[in-house]
Amino acid sequence: QVQLVESGGGLVQAGGSLRLSCAASGSIASTNAMGWYRQAPGKQRELVATITPRFGVTNYADSVKGRFTISRDNAKNTVYLQMNSLKAEDTAVYFCNARYAYRDYWGQGTQVTVSS
C-alpha cells in the first residue's frame, strides 16, 4: 500500500504562483509515471501533468503548458508542481497520482483557489 500526501494548495490571486508537493510512502522510482490531476466543481477529473521518475520525461495538458512545471526528487520520493501565472480557471482540487505496473494510487487532494 502506497500513501500519497499532497501539500501546498491555497488561495492566490490571478497571476500568482503556488508550488504543490506530493510525498509518497513508497519508492516513486518504481512507478511507470507520477502525475498531477485536477477536478473542478461539476467537472470530471482531468490530467494536468505527468513525469516518468526514471528519465524525467514530462507531459502537460495544453491548458497549462508554459505555466506549470512538474518535477521529481527520487531520493525524497516527492513530486512537485510549480504553478505560475495562475488563472481563475485553474481553481480545482489537485490530486497526486502514482502509476505502478499493478495499480494506481491517489492522494486525498489539495484545494487550489485562484481569485480574479
Image (tube, helix red, strand yellow):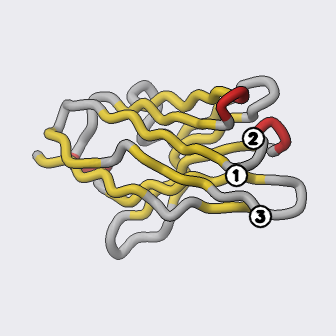
Q: Which residue is drawn at 75% across and 32% down?
A: 53
Q: x, y (%) of residue 95?
A: 51, 56
Considering the image in quadrants, where does the N terminus appear?
A: bottom right
Gap between marks 1 and 2, in whole Å?
7 Å
| First of labels 2, 3 by sequence position | 3
Q: x, y (%) of residue 31?
A: 81, 45
Do the residues bearing badges 1 and 2 touch, measured as CB atoms within 8 Å? yes
Query: Could you tell me the amino acid type at mark 3?
Result: Gln
Disc nearest the viewer among 2 and 3: 3
What residue would you read off at disc 2?
28
Query: Could you tell me the amino acid type at mark 2?
Result: Ile
Q: x, y (%) of residue 57?
A: 72, 27
Q: Which residue is drawn at 32% across and 71% down?
A: 41
| First of labels 3, 1 by sequence position | 3
Do the residues bearing badges 2 and 3 touch, measured as CB atoms within 8 Å? no
What residue would you read off at disc 1?
98
Describe residue 46's horizontal placement relative to residue 17 as left or right.
right
Q: Residue at x 65, y 31 (%)?
A: 76
Nearer to us in this view, 32 or 62: 32
Disc nearest the viewer among 3 and 1: 3
Gap between marks 3 and 1, in whole Å?
11 Å
Residue 27 against residue 92 in the figure, above or below? above
